[in-house]
Image (cartoon, rainbow, N blue to C red):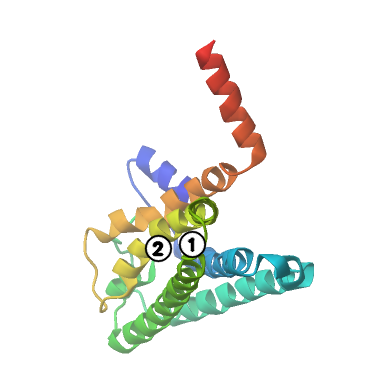
Amino acid sequence: MTPKLNTDLLAERMIISYNKCMTQLFIIHFLGSMEIFILTGMAYDRYVAICKPLHYAAIMSRQRCNTIILACWTGGFIHSASQFLLTIFLPFCGPNEIDHYVCNVYPLLKLACTDTSRIGLLVIVNSRLTALVIFVILMVSYFLILYTIRVYPAESRAKALSTCSFHITLVVLFFVPVLFVYIRPHVTFPVDKVFALFYTIIAPVFNPLIYRLRNWEMKALREMWCHLVIL
């Protein structure tokens, strides 16, 4: 999606073919929903690391990690396939202008030459259930973490919260706009394009940076830069 967006910004006419639009729709929902499931798996990993540190190696075994990743891919494919199948059979009457920078379900439903109220309801139920259930699971996991560390010393609590800080940052960047766009009834607003930037471009761009800030290589690099600045 990002290369296509960059090309459109430089072009006089912003055009996308039907096949490319459907491909973009499938890939965006596949990767987006997979990231939601991965954030859930990471929340479980943080819960085990903080609440059951002595059993972490046994619980988060290689087999368990592979199972979580496989479940993320499967869940992402099922969600994306359902959204894709609900959209691909809709009749689109000739060339149309989509009020978005990406082929998403809601803008495409507005272009269909048929009554899309039932399909829109199915899309809402699918997206809303996925987002709400995962968000509730994430909130429960962090409630359990906060409940567990309440008796820890101040230094241990700070370390535990630091362990979760990067994950919380991504959850906020990703889920707040997703819930705003998909939790309401089947309507679209111009501001949706702004919120879509967060879960389609901003959050994925910040993923490598946020994750690597906790790596020892990045910490060593920061120390080196601080030393050079002092000199």
**Residue 31 sits in which quadrant?**
bottom right
Q: Secondary structure at mark 2?
A: loop
Numbered mark located on residue 73 in the image: none
Q: Tag 1: residue type?
A: Gln
**Residue 227 sits in which quadrant?**
top right
**Residue at the spot 50% in from the left edge and 81% down from the top edge:** 82
Query: In the depicted view, which residue is nearer to us: 223 or 187?
Result: 223
Q: Tag 2: residue type?
A: Cys
**Residue at the spot 52% in from the left edge and 46% down from the top edge:** 210
- Which residue matches tag 2? 103
Q: Is residue 112 left or right of residue 218?
A: left
Q: Residues within 10 Å of mark 2 (few under 14, many from 20)?
A: many
**Residue at the spot 67% in from the left edge and 69% down from the top edge:** 69
Q: Position of residue 122 (x, y in %)?
A: 38, 86
Q: Are marks 1 and 2 in contact (CB under 8 Å)?
A: yes
Q: Earlier in the sequence, mark 1 or mark 2?
A: 1
Numbered mark located on residue 24 in the image: 1
Going by the picture, which residue comes out furthest to the top? 231
Q: Position of residue 203 (x, y in %)?
A: 45, 52
Label 1 to label 2, Cα distance in Å? 6 Å
Q: Which quarter shows the C terminus?
A: top right
Q: Position of residue 191 (x, y in %)?
A: 23, 58
User: Compared to 39, does 217 lie above or below?
Assistant: above
Q: Secondary structure at mark 1?
A: helix
User: Compared to 135, does 159 lie above or below?
Assistant: above
Query: In the depicted view, which residue is nearer to us: 207 or 13?
Result: 207
Q: Is residue 27 shown to the viewer in this render?
A: no
Q: Position of residue 18 (x, y in %)?
A: 44, 65
Q: Residues within 10 Å of mark 1 (few under 14, many from 20)?
A: some
Query: In the depicted view, which residue is nearer to us: 77 or 168?
Result: 168
